[in-house]
Image (cartoon, rainbow, N blue to C red):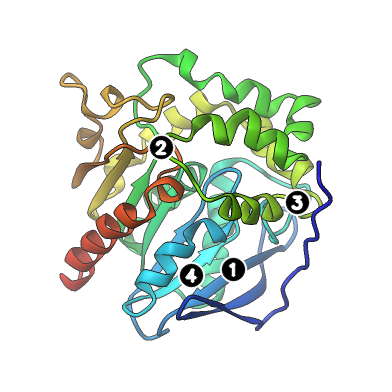
């Protein structure tokens, strides 16, 4: 594994992405066991409609850089490093997905976010499901990327076992090059610039990630938390966009458009759109297309004052 230099940001530090300026923040908010120290970035006008961006595994807020650049002129963007990732807290505690969603909501409360839209990917979507399902009054609309509702072939979720393995899990998450070779790159259906992957590898190199992230998978199985979230979908009375890559080997299209049980039927107000030609890492593989779909959905539903 190459030695990577990871230099933590400072609270209030500003950074430029293209023509957009983001500000780094560190905030300590209540947690189930002890306060959680979160890292997040903001961009755009704080008086505009707020959009909360929640990344997937094994990423950080930086997976949303193209969307931040494109949407900051219109919205107040808050992109969070999930607990255990990037520069957010990695301390032992309660790592159940539902609890972590409550801890995330405590952060959003503390920084004064009352109602907001959510855009999430992969395991960030698991947290968003709990947040939106348990607190539907807080969410205006929701773009839900790369997360199943139904599972027709359980063998497609075999990765849950090695993620939770007390020996292999920390080894896997402790070596970005191994993780990228073994999993992330193997799942890509499109070329992603090496410099972008290197940025994410550096973000995965912050101390503590190897021991922290596996706690999610040791707290529950994929199937248990999926079944637990299904009970919450009817609570989501806000508009939901299921935005899925149509070449994700682990989440095939019939998981979502099966005629007997379409995923959209789980929610009171949902639509399904495909990110054509994309695998699991949609916002890395097809950033322009993802941005276009997200922007159109947000413009429609936030303008409507939902």
Give whichever of discs 3 and 4 has the lower sequence position: 4
CB under 8 Å between callouts 3 and 4? no
Q: Is mark 1 on a helix, strand or loop?
A: strand
Separation of disc 3 and disc 1 at Cα? Answer: 17 Å
Which residue, given by chain and number where applicable, does mark 3 sit on?
A: 205
Residue in the picture at 53% in, 44% down:
98
Which residue, given by chain and number where applicable, does mark 2 sit on?
A: 147
CB under 8 Å between callouts 2 and 4? no
Q: Would you place residue 72 above or below residue 225 in this image?
A: below
Residue in the picture at 19% in, 44% down:
271
98 vs 282, nearest the viewer: 282
For the C terminus, the quadrant is bottom left
Separation of disc 2 and disc 1 at Cα? Answer: 23 Å
CB under 8 Å between callouts 4 and 1? yes
Which residue, given by chain and number where applicable, does mark 4 sit on?
A: 78
Labels 3, 4: front one: 3
Q: From the viewer's perspective, is 66 left or right of 241? A: right
Q: Is mark 2 on a helix, strand or loop?
A: loop
Give whichever of discs 4 and 1 has the lower sequence position: 1
Q: Would you place residue 44 above or below residue 7 in this image?
A: below
Give whichever of discs 2 and 1 has the lower sequence position: 1
Separation of disc 3 and disc 4 at Cα? Answer: 22 Å
Give whichever of discs 3 and 1 has the lower sequence position: 1
Give whichever of discs 2 and 4 has the lower sequence position: 4
> Where's residue 254, x and y in %?
26, 22
Which residue, given by chain and number where applicable, does mark 1 sit on?
A: 40
């Amino acid at each position: 594994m190459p030695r990577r230099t990871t230099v933590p940001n400072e609270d209030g530090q500003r950074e430029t992405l293209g023509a957009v300026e983001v500000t780094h923040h560190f905030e300590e908010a209540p947690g189930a066991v002890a306060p959680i120290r979160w890292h997040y970035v903001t961009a755009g006008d704080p008086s505009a409609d707020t959009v909360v961006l929640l990344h997937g595994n094994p990423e950080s807020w930086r997976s949303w850089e193209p969307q931040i650049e494109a949407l900051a002129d219109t919205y107040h963007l808050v992109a969070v490093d999930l607990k255990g990732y990037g520069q957010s807290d990695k301390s032992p505690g309660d790592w159940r997905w539902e609890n972590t969603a409550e801890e995330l909501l405590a952060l959003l409360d503390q920084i004064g976010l009352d109602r907001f839209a959510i855009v999430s990917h992969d395991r960030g979507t698991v947290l968003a499901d709990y947040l939106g399902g348990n607190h539907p009054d807080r969410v205006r609309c929701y773009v839900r990327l790369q997360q199943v509702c139904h599972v027709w072939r359980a063998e497609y979720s075999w990765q849950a076992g090695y993620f939770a393995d007390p020996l292999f899990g920390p080894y896997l998450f402790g070596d970005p090059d191994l993780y990228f070779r073994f999993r992330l790159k193997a799942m890509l259906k499109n070329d992603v610039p090496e410099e972008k992957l290197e940025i994410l590898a550096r973000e995965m190199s912050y101390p503590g990630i190897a021991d922290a992230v596996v706690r999610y998978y040791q707290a529950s199985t994929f199937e248990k938390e999926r079944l637990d979230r299904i009970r919450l979908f009817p609570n989501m009375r806000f508009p939901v966009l299921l935005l899925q890559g149509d070449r994700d080997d682990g989440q095939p299209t019939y998981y979502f458009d099966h005629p007997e049980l379409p995923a959209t039927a789980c929610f009171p107000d949902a639509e399904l759109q495909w990110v054509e030609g994309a695998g699991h890492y949609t916002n890395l593989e097809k950033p322009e297309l993802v941005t276009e779909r997200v922007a159109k959905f947000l413009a429609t539903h936030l303008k409507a004052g939902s």
